[in-house]
Image (cartoon, rainbow, N blue to C red):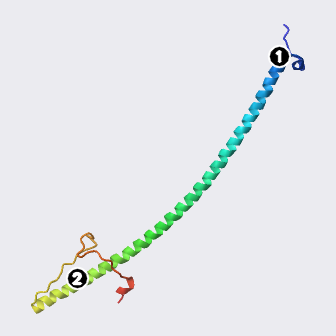
């Protein structure tokens, strides 16, 4: 049982083995080049992803800042609305007080006094007694 082993230097002398060795060498070079291109492609993809993460973090920061500004403005408006509600309630109470004085004057004098009904704008803001007109007011104008 003799096994055929090829001598190490047989590829130099035998053209059949030289052709096989040449194909192996070309395939190895082709694989190396393919691996190099793959590494370059993966590096480019990684750089693109890093750039995308950076851009998204920047956008996220800008959106967070806009949300903070909008929240701050909302809180300011909510505070201003609370002041206006309190002022409207105070004015309504003053008007009720004045109407009760008019009722007393009407009873004492015997003259009919036209006492308007007090609307409740806080309960039904869409039923305003007069056309909507801009009202200029400040919190300090109601101080005693």
**Which of the image's four quarters has the N terminus?**
top right
- Residue at image location 37% in from the left, 74% down from the top: 81
Quarter of the view holding residue 73: bottom left
67 over 27 or under it: above or below: below
Instruction: Tell me the mark number nearer the camera, choosing from 2 and 1.
Output: 1
How many marks are shown on the rendered structure? 2
Q: Regarding mark 2 in the picture, which secondary structure is present there?
A: helix
| Residue most extreme to the left | 110
Q: Regarding mark 1 in the picture, which secondary structure is present there?
A: helix
- Residue at image location 30% in from the left, 77% down from the top: 133
Q: Earlier in the sequence, mark 2 or mark 1?
A: 1
- Residue at mark 2 to residue at mark 1: CA–CA distance: 116 Å
Quarter of the view holding residue 32: top right
> Residue 43: horizontal and vertical position, in percent?
69, 45
- Residue at image location 23% in from the left, 85% down from the top: 97
144 over 60 or under it: above or below: below
43 over 102 or under it: above or below: above
Q: Is residue 64 left or right of residue 53?
A: left
Q: Is residue 116 left or right of residue 143?
A: left
Res. 96 mark: 2
| Residue most extreme to the top | 1
Q: Is residue 127 left or right of residue 113?
A: right
- Residue at image location 78% in from the left, 28% down from the top: 26
Tell me the crowding category of disc 1: few under 14, some 14 to 19, or many 20 or more residues within 10 angstroms, Cα based.
few
- Residue receiving disc 1: 16
> Residue 70: horizontal and vertical position, in percent?
47, 66
> Residue 59: horizontal and vertical position, in percent?
56, 58
Tell me the crowding category of disc 2: few under 14, some 14 to 19, or many 20 or more residues within 10 angstroms, Cα based.
some
């Amino acid at each position: 049982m003799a096994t055929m082993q090829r001598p190490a230097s047989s590829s130099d002398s035998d053209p059949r083995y030289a052709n096989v060795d040449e194909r192996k060498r070309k395939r190895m070079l082709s694989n190396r080049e393919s691996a190099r291109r793959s590494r370059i492609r993966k590096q480019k993809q990684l750089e693109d992803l890093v750039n995308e993460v950076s851009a998204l973090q920047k956008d996220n920061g800008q959106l967070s800042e806009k949300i903070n500004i909008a929240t701050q403005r909302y809180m300011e408006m909510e505070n201003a609305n609370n002041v206006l509600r309190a002022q409207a309630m105070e004015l309504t109470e003053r008007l009720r007080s004045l109407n009760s004085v008019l009722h007393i004057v009407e009873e004492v004098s015997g003259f009919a006094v036209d006492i308007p009904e007090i609307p409740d704008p806080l309960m039904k803001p869409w039923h305003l007694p007069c056309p909507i007109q801009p009202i200029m007011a400040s919190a300090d104008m109601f101080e005693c």
